Image (tube, grey):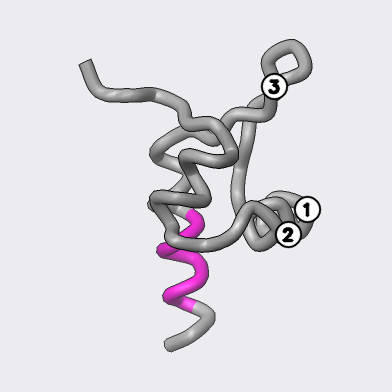
Amino acid sequence: MSELVLTVDEAAERLRVSRWTLYNLIRSNQLRTVKIGRRRLVPVDALTECLDRLTEVAA
């Protein structure tokens, strides 16, 4: 079974950015997250959505 959500560290690693950059994406509403208890998790499909939006802006 593939992963549904990633931790912030795992998401940052997949995008090859720092945690700081990932949190900036979250704060600017460019990256969707879910909060379960005290943990902030990133749905795997949110990474693709974020990259698609950033690619559109760059084009």
Mark 1 in CB contact with mark 2 (< 8 angstroms): yes
| Left or right placement of residue 32 versus residue 29 in this view | left
Q: Residue beneath label 3, please?
A: 39
Range shown magenta = 50-56
Q: Residue beneath label 1, please?
A: 27
Q: Secondary structure at mark 3?
A: strand
| Left or right placement of residue 11 versus residue 41 in this view | left
Q: What residue type is disc 2 on?
A: Asn
Q: Position of residue 29 (x, y in %)?
A: 71, 53
- Give the residue drawn at x 39%, y 50%: 14
Dot 1: within a 10 Å radius of its alpha carbon, few (fewer than 14), some, or many (20 or more) residues? few
Q: Secondary structure at mark 1?
A: helix
Dot 2 or dot 3: first in sequence order is: 2
In this rendered view, identify the residue nearer to me: 46 or 7.
Answer: 7
The secondary structure that dominates the magenta segment is helix
Q: Residue beneath label 2, please?
A: 24
